[in-house]
Amino acid sequence: MKVGLLFGSFNPIHIGHLILANYMATNTDLDTVWLVVSPQNPFKPSNTLVHEFDRLQMVTLAIADNPNLGVSNIEFGMPKPSYTIDTLTYLQEKYSSYEFVLIMGEDNVPLFPKWKNSERILEYHQVYVYPRSGSITSEATALPNMTFIKAPILDISATFIRQCIREEKSIKYMVPNDVAEYIQVHKLYQ
């Protein structure tokens, strides 16, 4: 099985994440896409993150009706911050018959050489790169084993959604209804 891994804080998961994950699962050679909830991204501050189990639950709710997508909390039991190479190594050991493909935004391509053991990621895994709004990376800057995928671009961010919630503005259509209800019931991002 060929599994795409879309890592993220998903703080909260939104329609852009879902459209991208579903597009990758249904319009590439991937059999499925797992959304890997990262407890702490080493490149992002943690002070705006809601609890990892809340974020995991929101992803679970968001993909419940989509058989092409899965959710993983694999990094919850790993040292924090989590590094992609460590997670890939662990997953490959646990699911030795699976082929794992890293899915990342093109804005990460210039930063990729700074990732922990980036050369090992490229040696053992394919990387599918999707377009990001405002990014000027081109396929010419791709590293070996990177493939650019012409996926839809949605200029929506979790930061914007959190700001809307704090300002008591509607987030309808930006997140699935179940996620919006979860946020409201648990008073997240207020």
Image: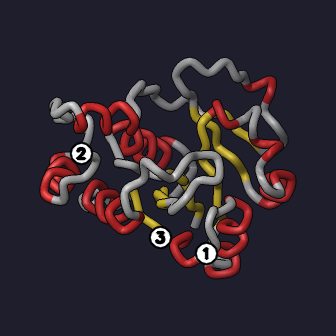
Q: Residues within 10 Å of mark 2 (few under 14, many from 20)?
A: few
Q: Nearer the viewer, mark 1 or mark 3?
A: 1
Secondary structure under badge 3?
Answer: loop
| Residue 80 x, y percent position in the rendering | 62, 67
Q: Which residue is mark 2?
A: 190
Q: Earlier in the sequence, mark 3 or mark 2?
A: 3
Q: Quadrant of residue 129?
A: top right
Q: Which residue is mark 3?
A: 73
| Left or right side of 98 for 170 | left
Q: Quadrant of residue 7?
A: bottom right
State the quadrant of the N terminus: bottom right
| Residue 112 x, y percent position in the rendering | 76, 42
Q: Earlier in the sequence, mark 1 or mark 3?
A: 3
| Residue 55 x, y percent position in the rendering | 36, 59
Q: State how the image is colored.
A: secondary structure
* Residue located at (58% from left, 34% from top): 130
Secondary structure under badge 2?
Answer: loop
**CA separation, marks 2 and 1?**
29 Å
Q: Earlier in the sequence, mark 2 or mark 1?
A: 1
Q: Nearer the viewer, mark 2 or mark 1?
A: 2
| Left or right side of 186 for 83 | right
Q: Which residue is mark 1?
A: 78
